[in-house]
Amino acid sequence: MVSGVIFKRLGLVFSTSRIGSEVMDNKITRRVVLGSIIGALAVGPFLIRAFRKSKQLPLGEESQLALFRKRFEPRVSFPRVYDGKPNPKLPADKAEKVLAIHRRYWENYSRLDEVEFDYSSRTIIDGKNEPNVWSMDAHVRMKYGYGMDAKGTDSEGNPIHLFFNLDGEIAPVGREESDLSSLMLSFFYAFCAHPEMVAVYVDLDEGVNLPQNPYVKGHGLYDAVRIMTDYEPGTTTFANDKFGYFSQETGMLELETRHNKKDQKINYQVLEYGLASGIMIPTRNDAYFNEGKGRITERYKNVKAKLFS
């Protein structure tokens, strides 16, 4: 289980006590602090040979490398066992259905071992590109339970090389500006499929249409889960209404809406998927905020995935 998950990504802030969306001073950051996630993968040869090689940290139970691995292995591993617990306030019938919905979502990602893809991301504020460490055009190689390597250019065309792995190799930007393990976990929006995230679902409406919005049309019917968000100070009233819409056809999360009761603004998270080696992988992941004046776009292309046998 995760103790106090905090996740800033694509303008979204996640926690086990709330999930919401914040954009501060027009600066978008990503950061993951995952308390204790159970799950580890064996390191295989598929991508490791291609990772950047440098002088490794010394070995030993109390060595710098051992402590590094102990800290970061849970952050870059995807749970292989579903041990999610529903919110205790849910009635038994809804709790069972919410678990089934989220478990189906988890099962898709739990099969993914290693993957490489072409990745593009941009942050746009008031129609202008806002350069940041997460905006790039890069080819990414990644293995859950080990690490990632991304080479390409930033949004201004400058060359970049981001890498992080459990051999203790980290790109300088990972030390200076952000935890690159958070970037790895954020790819494909897969963190939402971690078993502990089911605890923030506090209600369920089954078989609904996708709500009217300017960004995605939808198909068929959806199961809408209400997501726990911040409370108004000194009250037990949610400050926001947030819903996640899972396709009954595919089981995948395709839309999140967050309605701020104070300013009446609605933020959207939109995902579209394609098949890669038999599993669903996002081809598009976009966040829209400040009434569409701000957006963060992600595109995934040429995805090659290796699944657990």
Image (spheres, rainbow, N blue to C red):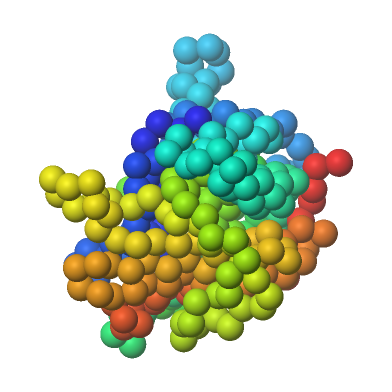
* Residue closest to the far top: 61
Residue at the location (67% across, 33% down)? Answer: 81
x then y, percent, for residue 205: 54, 60
Determine whether 35 is above or below 156 in the image: above
Residue at the location (73% across, 66% down)? Answer: 249
Is residue 63 visible in the rendered structure shown here?
Answer: yes
Determine which quarter of the picture holds residue 266. bottom left
Determine whether 85 is above or below 197 in the image: above
Residue at the location (57% across, 29% down)? Answer: 38
x then y, percent, for residue 58: 53, 21
- Left or right of 126: which side holds 232? left
Determine whether 186 is above or below 151 in the image: above
- Left or right of 183: which side holds 116? right
x then y, percent, for residue 282: 63, 66
Determine which quarter of the picture holds residue 20. bottom left
- Left or right of 300: which side holds 157? left
Determine whether 33 is above or below 133 in the image: above
* Residue closest to the far right: 309
x then y, percent, for residue 229: 33, 52
Quarter holding the C terminus is top right
- Left or right of 171: which side holds 98? right
Is residue 180 visible in the rendered structure shown here?
Answer: no
Residue at the location (42% across, 68% down)? Answer: 257
How many labels, in total?
Answer: 0
Name the residue nearer the viewer: 206 or 165: 206
